[in-house]
Image (tube, grey):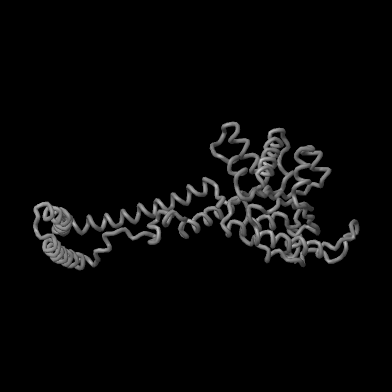
Amino acid sequence: MGYSREVYDAAMEILEKRRADARARAAALHERVAARHPRVREIEQEMAQSAIQVARAVLDGRDVEAAVERIKTQNLALQAELAGILAEEGAGQSDFEPRYHCPRCEDTGYVNGHVCDCLRSLLREEAYRRLSYAGPMQGADFDSLKLEYYPDTPDPRTGVVPRVRMKEVLTYCRCYADDFDTRSPSLLLRGPTGTGKTHVSLAIARKAVERGFGVVYGPAQMLLHRLEKEHFGRAEGSSEEMMTGCDLLILDDLGAEFSSPFYTSCLYNLINSRMLEARPTIISTNLGQNELMERYGEQITSRIIGTFVPLAFMGRDIRQIKLQQRIG
């Protein structure tokens, strides 16, 4: 799993709290019952002496089998007495043991050295929660992006029918999301504002997170600004490591950020590092190839054009179409 350290730590913190709470509840019950019935502690002490009594029988050369049988009978009587006391309190002896949220791993997150399903679930939930902060996840799926939003007549400039083109694009992206792994190619989603690039990016991110992959998503402006703040000491964090090391990095709306040499340098480092490590990246932008070249230079543009799968989005601004439909 490629979840970031922040996601893993947050999930483990939840497990540690669950474990501590379970133990605290059991201890509180024990203290409450023992305070009302001092005999409880006496019974526990007597039962704890059992192993010592057996050891003494061995050292003294006595009949060990008879000693074990006698101690067993004593313990059964003590257990019955303890059960009677607990019954008066409406509890059972098992109530003195922690009731973990996940009995399988006892809220440790691991079973025999393997990740427990409860930890996997927490990792997905935490990654999804963080993803939701960066983008509007509600409705971010492929089914909600209807082809009817795209014109079914040829574009006068290109002769291409947007609806036909977008059916191909959406089919490719859906398959990409369904089959995503760390060997998937990088994608360049390019086209006019409002044609579904952000929606598709989030749909891919959502699917990847659901399948257990670590995803970092955000508008390019937000992610680059975060790197800037950490670099110049205005914030703490390990965003650069997180962005270069995640299973999938999604830079949305590249070109909308403020232009600065620092941002350009950060962008180059991100793209180049992930390219060298063969980690997939998705970039969405309104800029054409010439505009990318003019803004970011040859080093960045050549890497994007040369290694990313280009997907051309077409059509009208879907947000405007939906607005017109709402107001009639």
Give the quadrant of residue 151: bottom right
- Relative horizontal placement of residue 155, taking residue 235 as reference (left or right): right
Determine whether, in the image, residue 110 is placed left or right of residue 150: left
At a point 52% along the width and 46% down the height, the residue shown is 6
Is residue 49 left or right of 208 when viewed as pictured? left
In front: 242, or 152? Answer: 242
Determine whether 264 is above or below 74 in the image.
Answer: above
Of residue 236 and residue 309, the one placed in the foreground of this image is: 309
Extreme residue in the top direction: 232
Residue 240, image quadrant: top right
- Residue 217 placed where, x, y %? 63, 50
Apparent side of residue 242 relative to residue 63 in the rendered image (left or right)? right
Q: Nearer the viewer, residue 170 or 79?
A: 79
Quadrant containing the C terminus in the rendered view: bottom right
The image shows residue 203 at horizontal and vertical percentages of 65, 59
Image coordinates of residue 119 in percent, x first then y, are 47, 56
Rendering quarter of residue 267: top right
Residue 230 x %, y %: 58, 35
Q: Residue at x 17, y 67 (%)?
A: 80
The answer to whether residue 68 is above or below residue 279 is: below
Badge count: 0
Most distant residue in the front direction: 61
